[in-house]
């Protein structure tokens, strides 16, 4: 059975990235498969996972979604 958990709030600084990283880590500890994506242009979630900025992907999901904007 698959489950989708989304963490969303328009307000900044409320702990969305920390909560999402904690949920992902807890799921992995229970041997569950996890797919997590960072849609924040500031890559806060990526940083929360401990990925150094110089090792983060150069092309973000936010960049991909913004391609359709005119």
Image (cartoon, rainbow, N blue to C red):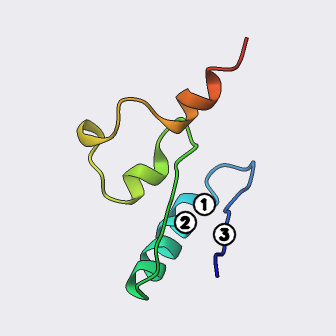
Q: Please tell me whether mark 3 sits on a helix, a strand or a loop.
A: loop
The disc, 2 or 3, on the residue closer to the chain's N-terminal end is 3
Mark 1 — residue? 16
Seen at 52% across and 52% down, the residue is 37
In what quadrant of the picture does the N terminus appear? Answer: bottom right
| Residue 60 position in % (x across, y down) | 47, 35
- Write down the quadrant of residue 19 in the picture: bottom right
Seen at 51% across and 59% down, the residue is 36
The disc, 1 or 3, on the residue closer to the chain's N-terminal end is 3
**Which of labels 1 and 2 is toward the front?**
2
| Nearest the eye: 5 or 31 | 31
Seen at 63% across and 24% down, the residue is 66
| Residue 56 position in % (x across, y down) | 32, 41
In what quadrant of the picture does the C terminus appear? Answer: top right
The CA distance from mark 2 to mark 3 is: 9 Å
The CA distance from mark 1 to mark 3 is: 12 Å
Is label 2 in contact with label 3 (beta carbons under 8 Å)? no
Is label 1 in contact with label 2 (beta carbons under 8 Å)? yes
The extreme bottom residue here reads: 30
**Which of labels 1 and 3 is toward the front?**
3
Q: Please tell me whether mark 1 sits on a helix, a strand or a loop.
A: helix
**Which of labels 2 and 3 is toward the front?**
3
Up-down relation of residue 43 to residue 24 (above or below): above
Mark 3 — residue? 5
The CA distance from mark 1 to mark 2 is: 6 Å
| Residue 21 position in % (x across, y down) | 47, 66
| Nearest the eye: 40 or 65 | 65
Q: Which mark is residue 20?
A: 2
Seen at 42% across and 75% down, the residue is 25
The extreme top residue here reads: 70
């Amino acid at each position: 059975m698959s489950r989708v958990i989304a963490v969303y709030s328009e307000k900044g600084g409320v702990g969305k990235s920390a909560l999402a990283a904690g949920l992902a880590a807890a799921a992995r500890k229970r041997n569950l498969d996890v797919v997590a994506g960072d849609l924040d242009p500031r890559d806060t979630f990526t940083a929360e996972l401990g990925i150094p900025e110089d090792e983060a992907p150069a092309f973000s999901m936010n960049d991909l979604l913004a391609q359709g904007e005119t």
